[in-house]
Image (spheres, rainbow, N blue to C red):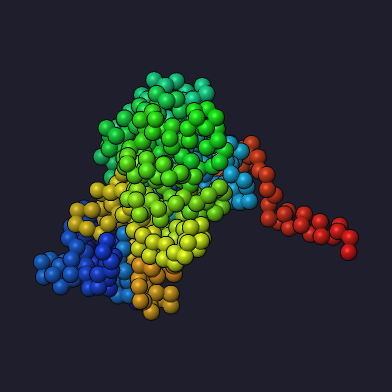
Amino acid sequence: MNQPDRDSLAAPGPLLLEPDAVLLPEGPADGWAVVIGDGRFETVGPAHELKRTHPHLTPVRLPGHLLMPGFVDAHHHLTQSFGAALAFGEPSEIFRRVWVPLEGALDEEAAYTAAKLAALEALRGGFTTVTDAGTRADVDVDVVASAARDAGIRCVLGLVCNDAEGEADQPAVLEKAEKHLARYAGDPLVHASLAVSIPEAATEGTLRATARLAAEAGAVVQIHVNEHLAGVERSLVRHGLRPLEHLHRIGALGPQLLAAHATLLTPHELTLLADTGTAVSYNPVASAWKGNAVAPAVAMAERGIRFGLGTDGTRGDGFRLAEAAEFAQRLAYGIGIGDSSCGAGWTWLEHAHRGGADAVGLGARTGTIAQGMAADFLLVDVDTPELALSWDLPWELVRRGNRDQITAVFVAGRLRLWQGAPTDWDGPALVRRAAELARAAVGRADVSRVHPTSTAARALHQAREWSTPQ
């Protein structure tokens, strides 16, 4: 199989890259090329034209490769990576029993290492942007920003603005929110965002104020909305309204809101999302692993509701996320009504990059291979048994793509990952240190799990079998 020349790709720009095809919004374009410089796509077009108009640049041929936008993770919790497997087999609403105690046990080094570990996994899975919903660790959120920068990934960085139940004073929360939004102005990789864990975690005044502040700053507010039955029922008891309806009543819906999960939606709530321009993070793997339902993403797409795809920290693999997005819709909605297409492949691929960028407030900056956009992209080896016999490449990328086919990951025009390894820092050393810190952090944390480990569950199962009279 043909491999590009790493040294040529790592050279300072401008670069003229000539793959076999470029993935454009309308589909793959054979024989196209791109010129990248100053972290952006300077030109995108047919290769013969770019070579004619840029005679001073030596084309870097990329045989057997597709140049496509990097994936955008619309919902992540970077500082929860030390406990990623603690959620397996657990019932829903585990944040109180697992995530809050775990993040509370992180010191500065542990929070930095956990976030950088999550960023490394994301890069390996083809994500060039991650959207962090705000850490509950008792550290300056800039620790997470530093981890993202050092890893080389673009990050929409949430600041938690909870103030209900005596967590914080509203004026102090809003002052911190304003400073956070200003803190990363002009940062090439970090983009400020506000966050509220769930609607009931903030007062109505703070929910309205964070919506206003984010809208004025061109940022997003991330809130877990309509994710679990328990949360919906608490809202009905407290307000007589479902969580999304409550946010609408107080004026918090709108293009600035990124509603995470939104799995439990009525037809009326779908109308509210469509009418207000509110965005959603559709997190299908989280639904499969620890959720109550699957968001009606096909219906969202049909009604023009803005949405991206999020991992929720489950696994950092963009191709498997896109596959899960289609797979979940097929099982939850398509089979019962005879819909064998469920988005026709392109829907999930598009919402994994361009739609995701729009949902997290970066649609004018990244997510598309186009002139002036940030050069956040992947070089995918399509000369493989999975993809070489191609009839419909977008469908095939969704159902047959794998992260081991990602040869290179670029963020802001720089080569950040080559064949699964960082290009300018020591990935294995980070993993080793993370393993040490994770053991200590989990040991300190007051984590409460319901389900035993798989080994313990197997032993219990066998014990029941042996104790049953034959």
The reply to whether residue 378 is visible in this rendering is yes
Residue at image coords 25%, 73%: 30
- Can you give x and y, in whole percent of width and height, for residue 250 in the image? 38, 28
- Can you give x and y, in whole percent of width and height, for residue 184 in the image? 31, 37
Q: In which quarter of the image is the N terminus?
A: bottom left
In this rendering, the answer to whether 130 lies above or below 350 is above
Q: Nearer the viewer, residue 426 or 441?
A: 441
Q: In which quarter of the image is the C terminus?
A: bottom right
Residue at image coords 29%, 46%: 362
Relative to residue 461, is residue 290 drawn left or right?
A: left
Residue at image coords 21%, 67%: 33
Q: Nearer the viewer, residue 297 or 81?
A: 297
The reply to whether residue 127 is visible in this rendering is no
- Can you give x and y, in whole percent of width and height, for residue 197 in the image? 47, 35
Report how many numbered discs are placed on residues in the image: 0
Residue at image coords 26%, 64%: 26
In this rendering, the answer to whether 63 lies above or below 196 is below
Can you tell which quarter of the image residue 124 is in? bottom left
Q: Which of 213 and 240 is in front in this view?
A: 240
- Can you give x and y, in whole percent of width and height, for residue 364 in the image? 24, 48
Relative to residue 469, is residue 458 drawn left or right?
A: left
Can you tell which quarter of the image residue 35 is in? bottom left
